[in-house]
């Protein structure tokens, strides 16, 4: 049905059961698929499913609606899916869509109806509900300004049912999504495995004269040939001076002898994101200065991982990592004691060379949702990605692995993927 292998629908049953436990009595919750976004002419961008409806149902198809109403007087709406009705004409032009039986198999939901029946069936039940839970994009990194599907649907529902009490589904779903079940960790580890295959491919491919876009092509080859949906974000393939640009993705420059190349990329497997960064010497050998900076970043990464454990506050963790980085920057001759003494507490001196955060939530989205002002808990997954960027030396080093918080500290899900500078040189020169 999908490019990736079928997912055990126990994942989605578990997610819905956990969600229902958090609802107020006599509440209905409604989740929508994302829009298909127009490109130019009659073309659309590749469809990407709304993370919340996928998390709760596994349905990876446009024009779908999930209804959860545990106290519904109509049993068929206690859990129900509404999907686009397929036809021979649709199959001829656009290929297969889920049948009702397939949607039942994917989601574990017995009641699957065609989308055309939604208005009539929801009208029969919704007036018995006291509360209506709706979902919006409340990821605190989001800067969306377009009136997307969930936003338009919320506006419509408020107009149709103005006397109901409306509730936000996002705080519930965000807390649930931030704690990974065993089923989710299996999927994330599959995505990690694809990232491993990708970087091992690049160790054999990178050499002086290759172009950044050729490396990008090798990356997507590794992903697609291993049943990934594609990139989990736009890949960063940044050689030389470009390595100092945090979100560089032009990927249009030639890699020169003596340069390093920073590769920040992730596979989207079954809608779960991987996120890994490695730095490779283009000619197979780091210069003494490049390796010195590289090892400083690796040291900060290893020390930062020790701090990731239950009960830690993300912002306090970042401040502690800053102190570790500060020490390394002094050793590299980039900061002095005087710089630190005179620093602005709101923008510490180390941020001149390490200006981004060390960790973000990971999961269905590469910058996943999570409660950043609440303590870390076992089952959460984070990136760990310190970096040092020295523009005047054309050296940008960032190293990134995926980390699982456990009851006893943390587990590096990418610890088996080469990261030591000497090991990387050895693999390139094999």
Image (cartoon, grey):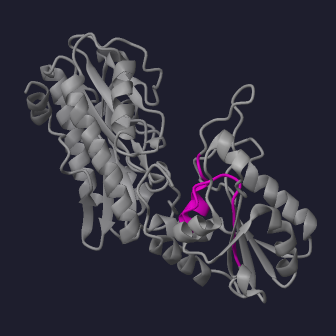
- Residue 291 is left or right of residue 41, and the answer is left
Residue at 37%, 59% (x, y): give it. 187
Q: Is residue 293 visible?
A: no
Residue at 32%, 28% (x, y): give it. 262
Residue at 52%, 63% (x, y): give it. 371
When the figure is inspected, residue 223 is found, relative to residue 181, above or below; the finding is: above
Residue 49 among those drawn in magenta: yes
Q: Is residue 53 visible?
A: yes
Magenta stretch in the rendered image: 48-68
The x, y position of residue 58, in whole percent, is: 54, 63
When the figure is inspected, residue 145 is found, relative to residue 5, above or below; the finding is: above
Question: Can you tell which quarter of the image residue 102 is in?
Answer: bottom right
- Residue 275 is left or right of residue 37, and the answer is left
Q: In terms of depth relative to the viewer, which is nearer, 338 or 363? A: 363
Q: In terms of depth relative to the viewer, which is nearer, 312 or 232? A: 232
Quarter of the figure that contains the C terminus? top left
The x, y position of residue 184, in whole percent, is: 40, 64
Q: In terms of depth relative to the viewer, which is nearer, 90 or 254? A: 90
- Residue 414 is left or right of residue 350, and the answer is left
Question: Can you tell which quarter of the image residue 19 is in?
Answer: bottom right
Task: Give the mark count.
Answer: 0
The x, y position of residue 341, in whole percent, is: 34, 37
Question: Can you tell which quarter of the image residue 288 is in?
Answer: top left
Residue 80 among those drawn in magenta: no
The x, y position of residue 234, in whole percent, is: 48, 34
């Amino acid at each position: 049905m999908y490019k990736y292998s079928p997912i055990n629908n126990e994942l989605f049953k578990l997610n819905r059961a956990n969600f229902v436990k958090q609802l107020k009595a006599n509440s209905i919750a409604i989740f929508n698929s994302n829009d298909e976004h127009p490109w130019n002419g009659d073309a659309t961008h590749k469809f990407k499913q709304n993370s919340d409806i996928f998390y709760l149902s596994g349905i990876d198809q446009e024009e779908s609606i999930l209804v959860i109403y545990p106290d519904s007087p109509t049993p068929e709406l206690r859990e129900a899916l509404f999907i686009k009705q397929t036809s021979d004409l649709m199959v001829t032009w656009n290929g297969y869509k889920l049948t009702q039986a397939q949607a039942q198999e994917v989601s574990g939901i017995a009641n699957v109806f065609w989308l055309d029946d939604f208005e009539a069936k929801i009208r029969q039940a919704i007036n018995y509900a006291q509360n209506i839970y709706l979902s919006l994009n409340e990821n605190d990194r989001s800067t969306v300004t377009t009136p997307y599907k969930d936003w338009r649907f919320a506006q419509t529902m408020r107009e149709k049912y103005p006397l109901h009490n409306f509730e936000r589904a996002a705080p519930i779903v965000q807390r649930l999504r931030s704690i990974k079940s065993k089923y989710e960790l299996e999927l994330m580890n599959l995505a990690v495995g694809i990232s491993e295959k990708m970087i091992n491919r690049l160790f054999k491919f990178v050499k002086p004269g290759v172009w950044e876009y050729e490396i990008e092509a090798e990356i997507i080859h590794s992903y697609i040939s291993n049943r990934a949906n594609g990139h989990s974000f736009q890949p960063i393939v940044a050689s030389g001076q470009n390595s100092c640009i945090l979100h560089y993705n032009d990927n249009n420059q030639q890699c020169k002898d003596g340069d390093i190349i920073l590769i920040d990329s992730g596979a989207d497997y079954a809608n779960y994101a991987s996120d890994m960064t490695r730095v490779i010497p283009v000619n197979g050998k780091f210069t003494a200065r490049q390796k010195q900076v590289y090892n400083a970043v690796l040291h900060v990464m290893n020390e930062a991982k020790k701090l990731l454990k239950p009960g830690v506050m993300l912002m306090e963790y970042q401040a502690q990592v800053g102190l570790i980085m500060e020490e390394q920057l002094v050793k590299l001759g980039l900061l002095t004691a005087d710089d630190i003494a005179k620093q602005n507490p709101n923008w510490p001196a180390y941020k001149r060379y390490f200006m981004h955060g060390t960790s973000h939530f990971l999961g269905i989205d590469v910058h996943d949702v999570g409660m950043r002002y609440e303590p870390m808990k076992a089952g959460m997954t984070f990136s760990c990605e310190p970096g040092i960027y020295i523009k005047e030396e054309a050296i940008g080093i960032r190293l990134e692995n995926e980390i699982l918080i456990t009851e006893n500290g943390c587990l590096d899900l990418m610890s088996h993927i080469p990261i030591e500078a000497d090991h990387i040189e050895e693999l390139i020169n094999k």
